[in-house]
Amino acid sequence: MKIGVLSGFGGWSESYRKACEELKVAHVMIDIESSQWMENIKAVDNEIDGYIASPPCLFQEYKTIYDERLFFIDQFFKKPIYPNYKSCYIYESKRNMASFLDFYDLPHAKTRVFSKKNEAIEYLRQATYPIVVKSNIGAGGTAVYIVDSFGKAKRIANKIFGCHNGLICTGNKPTSDKYLIPIGLSGQSQKHNMIVQDFHKIKWEWRVLKIGNSYFGHQKLLKGNKASGSGLVGWVMPPIEVLNLAKSVCDKGGFDVMHVDIFETVDGRLLINEIQAQFGSYLDYQMMVDDKPGRLVYSDEKGFVWEEGVFNRLNSCLLRVQNFVEILSKE
């Protein structure tokens, strides 16, 4: 068995390389960012059983190019991709994620995607505030705005669609304070479509990670009105209702690997906020119960069973490679 690890556009390819080496899995690194990407694939495809993908999240243009190239690997080379193509297509696309959740009637914060400015303004004029405005791409709570008035929402709409002409618009730019003063990040501007979500008061957000039959869960605690990007973690066992909702998302989508972020609102509802097939695991553990790291292993016979140990080394890429090898072995 030999795995092709797709590199380029950032991502986790280096962690996947180290995981393959540690697990003694034969692999080859393939630069998918290169202008010669097709030749790079053709040169090794005959010896490759499947490809590990690591899609980007920094620029919309990079993500679009990556999706296009994965499409050819999936549909023309017809080789397995991990995470699968459907998972990668939804990754870092709040538009695609909203469509997926709507299609399966999964509980989530209602999301509206406007490509017509007049339709957006009409909705914003009668909306109940606050609302949440998001960019299609962006991690860690960047480009997420809690907007408390029609006037502020209209100004954002004018940036996204242009005041009079869509050809003349700056887009809605997220800002960064890493450079001592706030700087608008023009390279991540949201243009020509506006994503608006209902605002919900939450107690916290649950993060559930699934890799194969392994599940990990913890709380993302609030910093101000947001849990995403807060860096505050509650190491407690997620309720079974949270675990079952996350599993339902993955079952419906056919996802082998996914993180599911779930709001727990102040009135006790569970609402899916985000799903992402690629996620950071900066600690060697992503779940702790009674100060002990571990995971939950799911089986139809026993349900979720706790297993103590450290399972998330190398950004969880060890566990992901093991899962992909298991999938390929069944092909």
Image (spheres, rainbow, N blue to C red):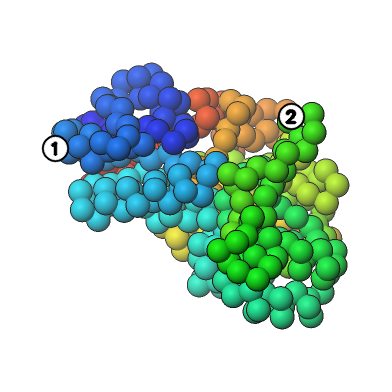
* Local SS, label 1: helix
Query: CA–CA distance between discs 2 and 1?
Result: 47 Å
* Local SS, label 2: loop
Q: Is residue 208 left or right of residue 128?
A: left
Quarter where residue 310 is shown: top right
Question: Type of residue at label 1?
Answer: Asn
Where residue 269 appears, as percent x and y from the top left, is 75, 65
Q: Nearer the viewer, mark 2 or mark 1?
A: 2
Where residue 249 appears, as percent x and y from the top left, is 53, 59
Q: Which mark is residue 141?
A: none
- The one nearer the camera, 263 or 300, is 263
Pointer 1: what residue? Answer: 46
- The one nearer the camera, 190 or 305, is 190
Where residue 107 appears, as percent x and y from the top left, is 63, 68
Question: Type of residue at label 2?
Answer: Tyr
Where residue 267 appears, as percent x and y from the top left, is 83, 65
Q: In the image as oriented, which residue stretches furthest toward the left?
A: 46
State yes or no: discs 2 and 1 in contact (Cβ < 8 Å).
Answer: no
Pointer 2: what residue? Answer: 179
Q: Earlier in the sequence, mark 2 or mark 1?
A: 1
Q: Is residue 38 left or right of residue 82?
A: left
Residue sitting at x 50%, y 65%:
100
Vertical order, 329 against 30 (above or below): below
Which image quarter is the N terminus in?
top left
